[in-house]
Image (spheres, grey):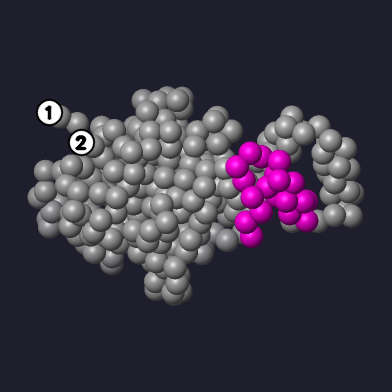
Amino acid sequence: MKAPSISIVMPVYNSSRYLSESIDSILSQTFSDFELIIIDDGSTDGSREIITTNYKDSRIRLIKNEHNFIQSLNIGMTQSKGKYIARMDADDIMLPERLQMQYHFMEENPDIDISGTWMQVFGDMDGIWKNTTASDEIEVQAILHSPLYHPTVILKRSIITQFPLVNDTNQVYNEEYIYAEDYQLWTELMKRGYRLTNLPHVLLRYRKSEGQISRQKQTEMQNTTLRIQTEYLEYIMDKIAKLDEDYYNMLDHSITLCNKGKVHFIDLQKIVYIIASRVIPGSSVHQ
């Protein structure tokens, strides 16, 4: 059987309230050459029954896993067969042309390894969320925050084979960075030389609600985010020093002041961000 062009990976955990709306938006895509891998992450609210009872589409593959969100993601990634992998969350909504536009973009831009999009936020919050689209600016933007919106992402499947196997599952997402595992993955991939970008189009409706993990686990997510930013800042500072050694003393002094508590970490981030925007080729200051 011919492998699909795209594998959509969607973990599901107690998502019965919005699950049908999410699946319907996938099955209504203008692009049809895909498989939908749904990983039941130990749901107890009837989510699994909604899938098995209401959906008979042969493109859907349902996998059961014990409750472990990171490993459910990794299982879905490992089990994918497509040339590309698209991420999706069980309470979000794909706009009809999402897969079509992302597939053609990736095919026409083989130098790009991972691509996100802009998205419309709805529910507890309304608005259009945008990230920068230039790869070099994304590398700098990641100093301050995650440069891609996770449920909008499509990436080359060949990337996941670069991660170690544990129990026959590629460890693409790292359990040590739970609640910000995507941010850590983007920074790790940039360190390895992969190129990231964003399409300047709204292709997903992202639901903000009180029940989301990121709202319930704010403190842990903030601590993990700080760890990611600290590690990535070290990488960027080293890169700056190699590109222009004149900045070495300035960066070294800034780190010393931060360690002594005379400069806040967020101020150190801003200093490095401004310097990186001027030194790293192709980037520019982009607040």
Residue 13 showing in the rendered view: no
Residue topped by disc 1:
1
Q: Name the secondary structure under disc 1.
A: loop
Depth check, front residue: 131 or 260? 131
Q: Residue at x 20, y 36 (%)?
A: 4
Depth check, front residue: 42 or 116? 116
| Pointer 2 local density, CA inside 10 Å: few below 14, some 14–19, many at least 20 | some
Q: Name the secondary structure under disc 2.
A: loop
Left or right: residue 49 versus residue 129 is left
User: Distance of mark 1 from mark 2, alpha carbons?
Assistant: 9 Å
Residue 145 showing in the rendered view: yes
> Start and end of the magenta stretch?
267-287
* Residue type, numbered disc 1: Met
The label number, if any, that marks residue 147 in the structure image: none
| Tag 1 near tag 2, CB within 8 Å | no
Q: Could you say which quadrant of the image residue 255 lies in?
A: top right
Query: In the rendered structure, does residue 22 fall within the stretch colored magenta?
Result: no
| Pointer 1 local density, CA inside 10 Å: few below 14, some 14–19, many at least 20 | few
Estimate the x, y position of residue 157 in percent, counting from the top left. Answer: 35, 32
Marks counted in the figure total: 2
Estimate the x, y position of residue 191 in percent, counting from the top left. Answer: 59, 33
